[in-house]
Amino acid sequence: EPEVTQTPSHQVTQMGQEVILRCVPISNHLYFYWYRQILGQKVEFLVSFYNNEISEKSEIFDDQFSVERPDGSNFTLKIRSTKLEDSAMYFCASTGSNTGELFFGEGSRLTVL
Amino acid sequence: AQSVTQLDSQVPVFEEAPVELRCNYSSSVSVYLFWYVQYPNQGLQLLLKYLSGSTLVKGINGFEAEFNKSQTSFHLRKPSVHISDTAEYFCAVRPWNTDKLIFGTGTRLQVFP
């Protein structure tokens, strides 16, 4: 069964460092998303991406964040200068239609020290 | 603005007992409704969804949910739970005019033998 894959599963970084989280969405999907879940809190929307551009982003997704689809398969989330409060589980998701049935990856846990 | 409330952070239940996980939402526009499950160390998996039509929807693993528009609720039920149903359950809504899912804080279902 096709699935969304994410790498790395866990990354530890120092505050101020750049981090890139990678995702391979399901191959025929067109809509891509990043969500995050701070420990003990709810899953929060970060950004959606369609047709090679951001379609919607949340207040969390400030200038420190960026997304890219560098080729036909990868979808990346970059955090330019990490802060302690960026520590969270980051989930990538994709869907083939906009009816909201998202398929999620297993997440990348980011720990900022 | 939209919000999702899952009043029960934890629900302990014995195997083969029935269970109901509560979800209420508020929204000024029509929404689509979803339940996702997260097993330990895994991503979010769609259990069921309500887009339109019959208010009683059936999902995977014997779960069902009923959309009640007047009470703005979408409670999840299962008549007889198994040990393997132990997981975190998230209710989510997607307003019709936006691209993002809004999640509740989750309910941890713990099934005891």
Image: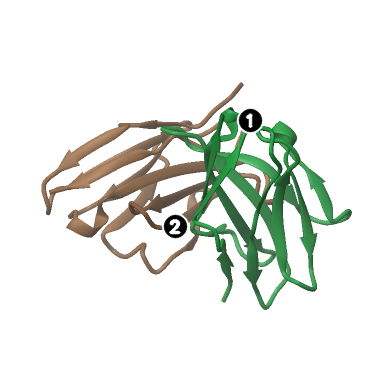
Chain colours: A brown, B green
The residue at which mark 1 appears reads as B82
Which quarter of the rendered picture does the N terminus of chain A lie within? Answer: top right
In the rendering, at what x and y percent does residue B82 appear? Answer: 63, 30
Left or right, A80 with respect to B20, comes to left
**Residue A83 seen in the figure:** no
Which marked residue is nearer to the observer: mark 1 or mark 2? 1
Q: Is residue A63 above or below residue A9?
A: below
Crowd rating for badge 2 (residues with CA inside 10 Å; few <14, some 14–19, many 20+): some
Q: Is residue B18 above or below residue B6?
A: above
Residue B71: % across, % down: 75, 72
Amino acid at the residue labelled 2? Lys
Q: CA distance from mark 1 to mark 2?
A: 25 Å
Q: How many residues crowd around disc 1 within 10 Å: few (fewer than 14), some, or many (20 or more)?
A: some
Residue B80 appears in the figure: yes
Q: Position of residue B48 (x, y in %)?
A: 71, 44
Q: What subunit carries mark 2?
A: A
